Amino acid sequence: MTERTFSIIKPDATKRNLTGKINAVIEDAGLRIVAQRRIRMTEAQAKAFYEVHKERPFYGELVETMTSAPVVVQVLEGDNAVAKYREVMGATNPEQAAAGTIRKLFALNVGENSVHGSDSQDNAKIEIAQFFTEDQIVG
Ligand code: ADP
Ligand code: MG
């Protein structure tokens, strides 16, 4: 089924000029980039986005990292986009990520792991709405 997921190319990746290389992996996997914008995330945006992790020990570091440099926020569309993108991203910790995944190819460590992807269709909808209006998504 065609669905949408939300993606972020994180600061560690934008700083190393990896946006194009990451987009190539995404497109080669059959996912279509139907919206994309480069932004500097505010502290309020990062805190709200990662609200679910606010009790975790790495929350402060995560908010700091996500606001440290520009990010590229994206909407991806395709067959089973949520699950497919999680597969293309690879495991959260790049040491555990499978060969050929974005995190295996590019991530520096578990915190600076180059990309975000929604973990469910419900969260994809919530996350997309935090950064895009429907008219900005061109499928
Ligand atoms: P994922 O991004 O794979 O969905 P999580 O939702 O568990 O992973 O965590 C969100 C983000 O928080 C991760 O992508 C990573 O940037 C950061 N993070 C997760 N675990 C750790 C950790 N142990 N130490 C530092 N940062 C972490
Ligand atoms: Mg997650």
Image: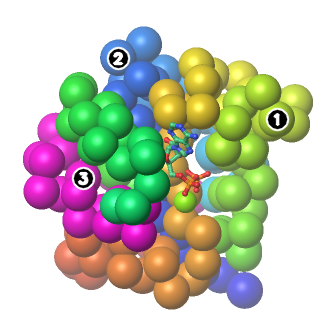
The image quarter containing residue 2 is bottom right
Q: Disc 1 beta carbon < 8 A from ligand 1?
A: no
Q: Is residue 87 visible?
A: yes
Residue at figure coordinates x 60%, y 24% from the top left: 109
What residue is disc 3 on? 46
* Closer-to-camera residue (69/29): 69
Q: What range is drawn magenta here?
A: 32-53
Residue at figure coordinates x 21%, y 76% from the top left: 133
The crowding category of the residue bearing disc 3, from other C-alpha atoms within 10 Å (few below 14, some 14 to 19, many at least 20), is: some
Q: Depth-wise, is mark 2 or mark 1 nearer the camera?
A: 1
Task: Label 1: state its secondary structure.
Answer: helix
Q: Disc 2 beta carbon < 8 A from ligand 1?
A: no
Task: Label 3: state its secondary structure.
Answer: helix
Residue type, numbered disc 1: Gln
The image quarter containing residue 134 is bottom left
Residue 96 numbered tag: 1
Determine if the magenta segment contains residue 37.
yes
Q: In what quadrant of the picture does the N terminus appear?
A: bottom right
The crowding category of the residue bearing disc 1, from other C-alpha atoms within 10 Å (few below 14, some 14 to 19, many at least 20), is: few
2 and 3 marks in contact (CB < 8 Å): no
The x and y percentages for residue 27 are 63, 46
The x and y percentages for residue 34 are 43, 62
2 and 1 marks in contact (CB < 8 Å): no
The crowding category of the residue bearing disc 2, from other C-alpha atoms within 10 Å (few below 14, some 14 to 19, many at least 20), is: few
Residue at figure coordinates x 49%, y 28% from the top left: 112
